[in-house]
Image (cartoon, rainbow, N blue to C red):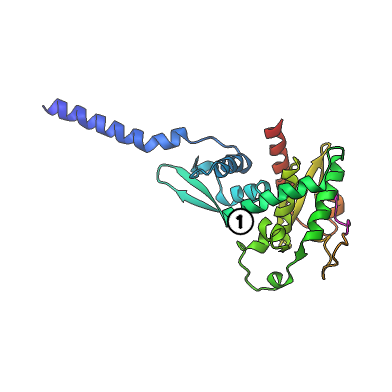
Amino acid sequence: MKRLAGFLLVLLLAGGAAVWWYPLAVSPHVQNPHQAAALLEEDAQAGGDGVLFRTEEVDPDEVYRALEARYPFAFSLHATVRPNQTTQLRVEVSRQARQQQAETYAEALAAESITPDMTEEQKLRALHDTLVRICRYDTDTAAQTAPDGASAPFAADGALLDHRAVCAGYGRAYEMLCEAAGIEAIYVASEEMNHGWNAVRIDGQTYFIDCTFDDPVPDRGEYVSDQFFLLTAEELSKTHVWDEAFYEQVLDNLEKENS
């Protein structure tokens, strides 16, 4: 009887260990925040409940930066650290129905703005001009001491549906427009400048587009500047500061995923 009891205890302990280690065993290996961001974007698009990662392999802040660069929706990232050396990351999209409405509108705008015979540069310019013409810079939100960064002016729905946004709204709306046109664009955020804009790759070369800086304040209706359209890193660095290496990695990983 004692032997049987001991055997059962071993089985119970082994079962408990399996329950403990199983989530760790099935968690995907990621080598950088960009790979984690790709998995989270896929999960968010599918309406999932989050992704379980090995805790030692993810820094939620860096994953947030990587996901923000490639995902045109405004969102929050929830991190739950578990005792079995795993961390669950879950994306929560702000005003999801409204942002999806903005995405649908972006598809319509892109269809109206570009034609199949356009070069990629011409398409990017047409989308840039469309956004600048329909949106005006939200000086009231920009002047607030502690604005709500999850509100519409910071997202694509503010720029596309309300026609009023700050730089984050312009950047996310432009990313959404490019996605609708089949062009890979990312959102670049600069903590030093408290500002955001976009980057694209054309024939292996990175270029930057700042729709916010190309929209005059006060708004001038149909007038569109091109001073900050398709600038090289060297040209943009005269006025902007950003983590260039990080966003080159974002573009590198997107190219690998699409190759």
Question: What's the magenta region?
Answer: 225-232
Q: Quadrant of the N terminus?
A: top left
* Main secondary-structure element of the magenta-colored stretch: loop
**The magenta stretch spans residue 227:** yes
Quarter of the figure that contains the C terminus: top right
Q: Is residue 258 above or below residue 169?
A: above
Comparing 34 with 160, the one in front is: 160
Question: Which residue of the protein is positioned furthest toward the left in this rendering?
Answer: 1
Q: Which of 44/189 is in front?
A: 44
Question: Does 3 sit above or below residue 67?
Answer: above
Specify whether residue 79 is in view. Answer: yes
Q: Quadrant of residue 164?
A: bottom right
Q: Which residue is mark 1?
A: 98
x and y percentages locating residue 149 in the rendered image: 62, 63
Q: Is residue 50 magenta?
A: no
Q: Amino acid at mark 1?
A: Arg
